[in-house]
Amino acid sequence: MKAIPRRAASLRCIVDRIRDSLQLDVVLQTAVDEMGDSLAIDGCLYFWYYPDIERIQVVCDYARNSPNPVMGHYSLEEVGAIAPLIRQRRVVANMGKHSAAQGLRSIARWLAQGNNGRQSLITLFGRVVTLLVPVQGQGDSIGFIACLERQPRAWSADDLEFIETIGQQLEIAIRQAQLYECTQKQAQRERLVNQITTQTRQSLDVKTILPDAIAHLREALDIDRCLVHLVEPLTAEGGSDGDYLSTSSDIFRRKHLFESCRHPFCPSIEDFDINGPMTRWVIANRQQVVISDVTCDPRIGEGNREYQLAQIKSSLVVPVQANRQLHAILYLNQCSHIRYWSQDDRNLAQAVADQLAISIQQAHLYQQMHQQAEESATQAKILEDALEELKQAQMQLIQTEKMSSLGQMVAGVAHEINNPVSFIYGNVPYVERYMRDLLTLIDAYQTHIETTEDLQALESTIELSFLQQDLPQILQSMRDGSARIREIVNLLRSFARLDEASYKAADLHEGLRSTLAVLRTQADDAITIHEHYGDLPEVECYPAALNQVFISLLRNAMEALESVSHSDKQISITTEAFEVPATGVTWVRIAIADNGCGIPDAIQDKVFDPFFTTKAIGQGSGLGLAVAYQTIVHQHHGRLSFHSTPLQPTEFTIEIPATRATGSAHARQHRIPPTNRPFPNLVS
């Protein structure tokens, strides 16, 4: 009778210790230790039974004499004759068998009646199983307490009732610990998913999201490798599938592959086969793959070199998909040992995969939206450029039409003048000869015929002697004047160039001279024009268009000198040929400089803008320099620049290739530096 209170006190102490912790491993280890000490048995085990994979996992081991530890995973085939009892969740006591439905208390009553059961020994790990008690955990989880002895042991009814009470309390403690553990894992899963969600909100770049996600997942599941394979190209970045780089100490990346691995395992993405058997299977079936031992999976095979190089022993493969579209495949690999993936492992991996699918899908949408925005911006830029080109074409068309009308008018005037001037110029020699003959005849009459008073009076009236002296001079003046008019007509025809091809090899000096002849009447008499012409080859160009450029630059120079107060007003025109060393192409340079007051800094950026002018309304169109820029840069593939400092001389420089074919390519590839020569013969 005294033993009963002691057994009750011991039971209360054991129950208190079992229920003192919410850590499942602590609860189970405490239970087997207390049972082993209280019942004085050689060994006590607690193992979980996984019916879906027909395996047990020994998680706690008590041994009085410290035999070899037996914790780990075992198939039911390895545990021998006890396997059917485990499958049927039977109770084993005193080497006999009894239905678990009747419970330990029923067995205790049965034994108290003097029954000993069948003496069929059942062993586990080399020891006799004297007691096997199933313990129901939360949900479908089922575990067993196994008492092991070297020799058979007969249990008393009190022992069995004691064990049954411990078992009942253990079931409560296990369910509480499992509930706590489930809550902790759920919280961990939610933290990880929330972290990925937060990263997705902060960055829609998968190259930022994926490395962090797989690193945290690897730590959460305590695995050796975590790899994600993007089965669809996410960006159009360059490089081949062999591009490899390390992004941090434990994160590695290859195009479409990201891996997180822990020491001492090296990255395996160099050896990863993106068309391997597991990749093909998941793409085809879109299902999760659970592999405890890769050597036993027929899809991988025992001699798979990829898995051997990566030292992979167990693998959990999860498709990353959303809306029936597969975006990636998540590989969770254990290398240090064979791992039997729990349902919690699979749930956490699936939750992360689902969130990654959403993140990748959002990244796809963001990329498409960004690409569409870029395309829209590009299209808008094209339309803007087209509008600008249309404006410039319209502007150039207006200016060209004006110059064409001017050219036609000049050519018409020159043509109309040319005929009478040619008539006068051609008949002056005949008039001169006739005049000499008449004067000779008059001299002969004066010599051989005596003059009368009437003739003398007439000679005095008409001043014959003065007429004889002045008439040759008048004819010479007529000759010179008609020659000058003819020269001007030829210059006007040369300036207009209506009778020539639009594109031809031309002498630029001739164009400059004809332009100066046209503008000479507009120039202030106080302006001195200095011409420094070098040795220029003939240039393949549009002569009429270049003449328009010359007239615009020279007219601007003349107008700039109108506002200066000093009397030494000078314009310098300098030409030279030069060769570009890189290509050997010959270019020509025409510099037109004036010693006016310069161009203010505030408007220098607008000089070549269409319709920009500093003149009063009605005095300037703002097209001259804009058309000149278009003509030199776009039509002749050259360069038009200027150098100006306020209150200092201004120089406009034209640089064009002598031949169009070679110059065009050169203008696209090379920048011709502006000349830094001083302005010749200019006094500021």
Image (spheres, helix red, strand yellow):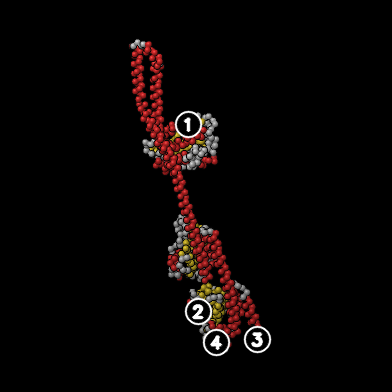
Select label 4 or label 2 by which is in front.
2
Camera-nearest label, 1 or 4: 1
Rendered residue at 47%/53% (across/down)? 376
Q: Distance of mark 4 from mark 2, alpha carbons?
A: 24 Å
Q: Amino acid at mark 2?
A: Arg
Give the mark, 1 or 4, whose residue is nearer the N terminus.
Answer: 4
Q: Which mark is residue 523?
A: 1
Residue 401 placement (x, y as % from top left):
42, 40
Q: Amino acid at mark 3?
A: Met
Q: CA distance from mark 2 to mark 3?
A: 39 Å
Instruction: Residue type at mark 1: give it.
Output: Ala
Decide if residue 450 is in sight here. yes
Q: Position of residue 277 (x, y in %)?
A: 43, 66
* Image quarter hosting the N terminus: bottom right
Q: Is residue 26 visible?
A: no
Discs 1, 4 touching: Cβ within 8 Å: no
Q: Nearer the viewer, residue 579 or 49?
A: 579
Q: Nearer the viewer, mark 1 or mark 3?
A: 1
For disc 2, the marked residue is 87
User: Badge 1: few (under 14), some or many (20 or more) residues near its Cα, within 10 Å?
Assistant: some
Return the x and y of residue 611 as percentages of the image width and height: 49, 41
Determine the residue positioned at 52% across, 82% down.
121
- In the image, farthest residue toward the front: 454
Q: Position of residue 135 (x, y in %)?
A: 56, 78
Q: Is residue 382 left or right of residue 25?
A: left
Given the image, on which type of amino acid does mark 4 rest? Asn
Residue with the most extreme bottom position:
113
